[in-house]
């Protein structure tokens, strides 16, 4: 069925920020590292504003664990509130929506008005009629081989951009014991326009059939790798294939706020 959305849209897609990572412990080096991850997230918001993105997608693992001090949660929500567009977010396996969920405890009154936090394990569609867009996502509760991040994806809407969020592991092998598997068949059969993926920390295009799908990679300097520090910039124009570009997080922000190289 040919899609007939009435307007173009542009999306900034990020995931796996891993705020509050304890990779380097609680000492000076650990604090420095956590501060650099925070700067990376602030720069993602900056980039979305500067490029006037229509939507910002945060596809899981914004936090590294469910041990998040109130001050860190306030930082993250404050940054999201600075975004001048709707932000759609799902939990990942590190910040899963289980019995320790940091999101379950949030008072809706403290959430920024532009944040659409999807916490339904069965999934939820959010309509943005002014953008001719619908977004589907669901909350990861248990990261296990039985959990299918794309199960329950509805049929695409013929007059909307159909954008899905999924946090899991893309695999071309059959059942192999990997948790939260996402298969090429599921992507191809969906007929959705774009599937924004999270979980893998480096950029990867796993498009199938008419459906574009990509991992954006982590925006944070989690590893001393040229493959970290990016977001995906997705352009949807009626009648054209969906286009996926990468934007460097350091791009366009003041030198003083750019993360330095890992020591
Ligand atoms: Mn993950």
Image (cartoon, rainbow, N blue to C red):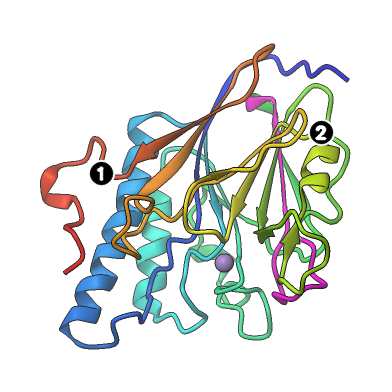
What secondary structure is the stretch in magenta mostly built from?
loop
Q: Quadrant of residue 236?
A: top right
Disc with the residue nearer the chain's start (1 vs 2): 2
Estimate the x, y position of residue 173 in percent, counting from the top left.
77, 59
The one of 37 and 7 positioned closer to us in this rendering: 37
Q: Is residue 51 left or right of residue 126?
A: left
The correct choice, above or below, for 35 with respect to 10 in the image is below
Q: Is residue 215 left or right of residue 222?
A: right
Estimate the x, y position of residue 204 in percent, counting from the top left.
54, 45
Residue position marked by numbered label 1 in the rendering = 250
Q: In this view, which residue lies farthest toward the bottom?
A: 26
Q: Which residues are magenta?
A: 131-148
The correct choice, above or below, for 5 with respect to 139 in the image is above
Q: Quadrant of residue 251?
A: top left
Residue position marked by numbered label 2 in the rendering = 191
Estimate the x, y position of residue 146 in percent, counting from the top left.
82, 72
């Amino acid at each position: 069925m040919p899609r007939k959305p009435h307007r173009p849209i542009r999306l900034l897609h990020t995931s796996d920020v891993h705020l509050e990572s304890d990779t380097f412990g609680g000492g000076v080096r650990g604090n420095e590292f956590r501060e650099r991850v925070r700067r990376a997230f602030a720069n993602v918001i900056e980039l979305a504003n500067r490029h006037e993105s229509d939507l910002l997608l945060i596809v899981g693992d914004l936090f590294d664990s469910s041990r998040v001090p109130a001050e860190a949660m306030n930082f993250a929500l404050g940054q999201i509130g600075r975004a001048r567009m709707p932000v759609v977010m799902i939990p990942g396996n590190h910040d899963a929506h289980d019995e320790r969920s940091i999101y379950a405890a949030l008072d809706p009154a403290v959430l920024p008005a532009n944040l659409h936090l999807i916490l339904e394990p069965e999934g939820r569609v959010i309509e943005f009629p002014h953008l001719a867009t619908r977004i589907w996502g669901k909350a990861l509760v248990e990261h296990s081989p039985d959990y299918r991040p794309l199960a329950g994806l509805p049929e695409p809407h013929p007059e909307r951009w159909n954008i899905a969020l999924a946090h899991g592991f893309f695999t071309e092998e059959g059942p192999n014991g990997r948790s939260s598997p996402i298969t090429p068949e599921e992507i191809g059969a969906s007929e959705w326009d774009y599937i924004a993926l999270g979980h893998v920390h480096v950029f990867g295009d796993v498009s199938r059939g008419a459906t574009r799908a990509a991992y954006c990679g982590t925006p944070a300097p989690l590893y001393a790798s040229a493959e970290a520090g990016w977001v995906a910039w997705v352009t949807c124009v009626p009648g054209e294939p969906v286009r996926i570009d990468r934007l460097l997080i350091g791009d366009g922000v003041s030198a003083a706020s750019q993360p330095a190289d890992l020591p």
